[in-house]
Image (tube, rainbow, N blue to C red):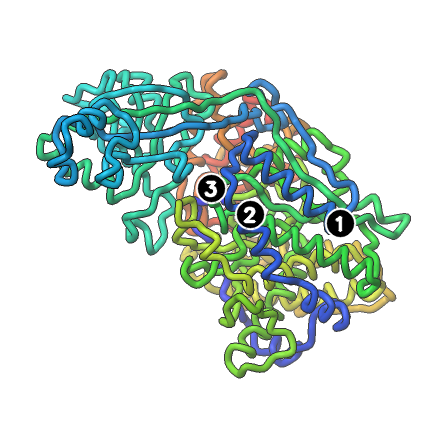
Amino acid sequence: MRKGIAVKVVIAGGLLGGFASATWGQRPPLLPERDVAALANELSGETAKRNLEVIATFHRQRGSKGFHAAAELVASRLREYGLQDVEILEFPADGKSFYGTQRSRPAWDAEVGELTEVSETRSPCQEGLPDEVGKAHQEGKVGALVGCHNEGVLASYAAQPVVLAEDSESAEVTAELVDVGTGTKDSDYAGKEVKGKIVLSSAQPGAVQDLAVGKFGAAGIVSYAQNQKTAWWGEDENLIRWGHLETFSANKTFAFMVSLKTARGLRERLAQGDKIALRAVVKAGQHPGNYEVVTATIPGADVKLKAEEIAFSCHLDHQRPGANDNASGCVTILEVARTLNTLISERKLAPPARTIRFIFPPEIEGTVTLLNAQPELARRIKAAVHMDMVGGGPTTKAVFHVTRGPMSLPSFVHDVAWAFAEFVNEESYQFAATGKADYPMVAAEGGKEPLRAEYSAYTMGSDHDVYQDSSFGIPAIYLNDWPDRYIHTNFDTAANIDPTKLKRAAFIGAASGYFLTRNSPDMRFAVKARVWQGRATREAQDRARVAELVDFREGCGYLRQHLAFEQAIETTANVLPSRGQTFTPPKYEDRYQEFYCPAAENLATQEQQGKSPGDGQKFQRSENPKGPLAVFGYDYFADHAKAVGIGDPKLLSYEGLWGSGEEYGYEVLNFADGKRNVQEIRDAVSAEYGPVPLEMVVDWLRALEKIGVVSEVK
């Protein structure tokens, strides 16, 4: 999971919160109870965790030997489970090939990574060692301090692969250590001689390398970056966090990641005037390779609908162990595959009308690559269920989310997922509180606490961004844990994964995906009922957010945009067949009267005073390139903007009430459909993330126009 943007949680309930429980009670939603019972009985949290324990032993960087081993394991399980069309697709990853907005990143492998202190000043543990041992240690011979438990070894790739930053290059260096603070600005190097030395930085290696190595001539980097800030940030000083160098930087180097505890010790010694010498031995590097994507299917049975697909997605890559992020998502959809195929084969579930596809790619870049390389597949996928971190047990402090899609892509599918998640919430709480429930969905090796899933507004950071980008327009159900205090660290281990959580996540995903594959004539009525209930839940957020908007026009504009969004969600449900049932939701237009808002046309007249030049213009997204502009390890906008002399648009660093620059940029581009004018785009993203100056939206669209991503509609 590529985090960094705060999750925006919707408070469950709203006007009809009490009605929901009273009406639905413990009756399973949407699917016949026999189907729900079959899924609940067959899904196994233990089977999922057994697979996770194996996958977590692989260091799964893109294009690496470890990723290939994990891909082969997943493919073998899929074949064992009886799925069809099992294959490992390969797409060249050479640094030159483009797949839409993703510049392919060369594969990266590592064999050796050792960082050892070889200072003349002996540590207390070194005192009294035989001279020949001390000399060997000073010469950087790994393992010289056998009698001292290798106190001199600061980082070992063999023991913990996470210590070697991704995209490190081979080196054999003995050099002095220099503390440069963050190391991200020139002033950090003032008065310090770093040429030929190793710098100690609190920033990610990729943010440091062009200055430290490219400008000031450092030989390498040691980082103690404390990314993924949560309430537990910096609390456990033994955590070692995953680090990255920039894939396409001209200043190739190596970087090691150390714990906060190790870094504090080094900084204190340096501050006292100690000379610390380190020896770095690295055998690693980029090389031409392939993006590998594992896929398999359960074929649809309806002649007219089997060409349409419902996809289950995860991301298979990550550092070792990478248990919750994201071995958990991969083994959960693997368990969904086993369960659905078993139940369908045994005729306990009806065959799906639409084809079900399972996809195991590298995160984001693999999905962008797949959908661009196989456009016919992208057209066949009608919805996706994406899982990224779904197994965090109590020690991780994880909160489970069912995350909705962006406002640019209204869809009923998120209400389908929430219907099943709410059912699991109710059943698991009932079981925890009383010891009795029809569907507790508890694994024998797992916990018994309630799930307490949250229904959350859209937040970015994983492959669901790709599916829901306007290039592809595929609604994606996003199941995810956040926060997780061990994300991207050496402590993200299988021991912290709860089989009960895996089983419950699998049920929500399996039930949602299977429901979407069906062609039942009763579906439309049930879906619209759930959309109504979803509206009631979202109403709570609307009320809370409108209260933050003290500007009259902004508040009324917010209500108008969200009313249109709700109506669009209901419209998407009309694609399903029905027997003529009708379902009339409450009139949410009453919100205008409640807040004393004038009609839209009168409000528009008042807003004329706030308009700026260019606000009536319309922009249309270009057919190519396809994909979000912020992908993985490559910034399409920054790369192309530099070529035409465009600076950093202010929108990308803007902080709104409920969103930040990357989110605004993503959605402005998604809303550029050739129909909305710039003012309407500005109003739409303001309703989603908070008011934003119109000028910033205009400047962003003009910048996108200059690099060919959008064109003005005359």
Farthest residue, direction left:
272
Q: Is residue 412 visible in the rendered structure shown here?
A: no
The residue shown at (62%, 81%) is 22
The type of residue carrying mark 1 is Ile
What's the residue type where badge 3 is placed? Arg
Residue 356, numbered circle: 1
In the rendered image, residue 695, in percent from the top left (x then y), is placed at 46, 35
The picture places residue 626, in percent across and down from the top left corner, at 64, 31
Residue at the farthest right position: 303
Q: Is residue 357 among what the camera can see?
A: yes
Q: Which mark is residue 320?
A: 3
- Residue that mark 2 sits on: 54
The quadrant of the image that shows the C terminus is top right
Q: Are marks 3 and 1 in contact (CB under 8 Å)?
A: no
Query: What residue type is disc 2 on?
Result: Val
The secondary structure type at the circle numbered 2 is helix
- What is the C-alpha distance between the residues marked 2 and 3? 11 Å
Q: Earlier in the sequence, mark 2 or mark 3?
A: 2
Alpha-carbon span between mark 1 and mark 2 = 25 Å
Nearest to the eye among marks 1 and 2: give it.
2
Instruction: Indicate which label's residue lies in the foreground, 3 or 1.
Output: 3
Q: CA distance from mark 3 to mark 1?
A: 30 Å
User: Residue 657, how many percent across, how many down?
Assistant: 42, 51
Tag 1's secondary structure? strand
Whether residue 376 is situated above or below residue 215 in the rendered picture: below
Determine the secondary structure under disc 3. Answer: loop
Q: Earlier in the sequence, mark 3 or mark 1?
A: 3
User: Crowding near pointer 2: few (<14 within 10 Å), some, many (20+)?
Assistant: some
